[in-house]
Structure formats: structure tokens, C-alpha cells
Amino acid sequence: MKNLNLSPLKKLEIILEGEHREFATDLLDRAGVKGYSIINNLSGKGSQGFHEGHLMFNEDSVLIMIIAAVPEELVSPILEGFAPFYGEHSGVVFISDIQVTRLVKFRD
């Protein structure tokens, strides 16, 4: 891995109901997140029991995960934006330390 420069970032894995996708992506956009990936139709078990990942009625009825790599200074503002939301809705945000090879894709 010659000439491979690794840079530290934080990975956010945001799980919420599909009907709230626009709220979450708007919050990330306003916070200055340069990009994210969205995974639809999640399955899993949590405090509210097992959630089946197949498409039930429409994309609003399933769980989604939004994955974003962000500089550490964006984590707190993003979490503050989600705090009132998660007070009223189900879901979670996982935060982990990662390293990326092309920092220019994630910072201004």
C-alpha cells in the first residue's frame, strides 16, 4: 500500500424509519456533510422487537440506514439536530472511528 495516506474521520450509521429520510438527509446537508449512502429495507431486532426488512406498503414503512463519514467537529451538531427527533421516534445513531484514503471527498 505504497503512498496510501489515511486520514481519521467519524462514521455515522443513522437508523430510522423511511418516512423520515428527508428530515435526516436535510439535517446532514445543512450540517455540511459532503455525501452519504442510504441502505433501504433493514431487518433487525431492537427494543421494539424484530423488524422485517421486506417492502411492506411503500418505502416509508421500512427502516433505512444512512451512512456518512464526517469530520469530528460535525458530530456534535448533527447529534444535537437528531436529539429532539429521537425523543419522539424510534431509531439510533452509531458512531465509530474510521480512516479514509481520499480525505478530499469528505472535507471542504
Image (cartoon, rainbow, N blue to C red):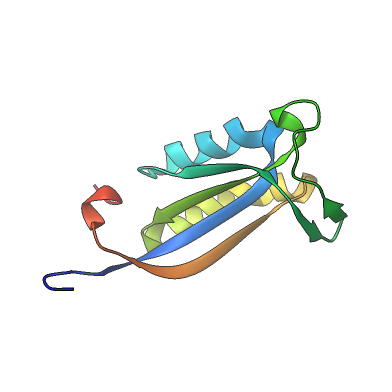
Q: Residue at x 36, y 59 (%)?
A: 71
Question: What residue is rendered at 50% in x and 68% in y?
Answer: 96
> Where residue 76 sits: x, y (%)?
50, 59
Of residues 75 and 65, the one nearer the viewer is: 65
Q: Position of residue 45 (x, y in %)?
A: 80, 59
Q: Quadrant of the N terminus?
A: bottom left
Comparing 5 with 14, the one in front is 5
> Is 99 above or below relative to 81?
below
Query: Please, which residue is most extreme toward the bottom here?
Result: 1
Q: Residue at x 59, y 62 (%)?
A: 94
Answer with left or right where residue 72 lies relative to residue 62.
left
Quarter occupied by residue 18 = top right
Task: Using the image as rendered, state which of residue 62 and residue 68 is in the foreground.
Answer: 62
Judged from this view, the residue extending furthest toward the top is 58
Q: Is residue 33 left or right of residue 77?
A: left
View extreme (right): residue:
49
Query: Quadrant of the rendered structure where residue 93 is?
Result: bottom right
Residue 99, image x and y in percent? 34, 68
In the visual, does 30 lie left or right of 86? left
Q: Is residue 24 above or below residue 44?
A: above
In the displayed structure, 20 sits above or below 50; it is above
In this rendering, the count of numbered labels is 0
- The image shows residue 28 at horizontal and vertical percentages of 48, 42
Front-most of 95 and 38? 38
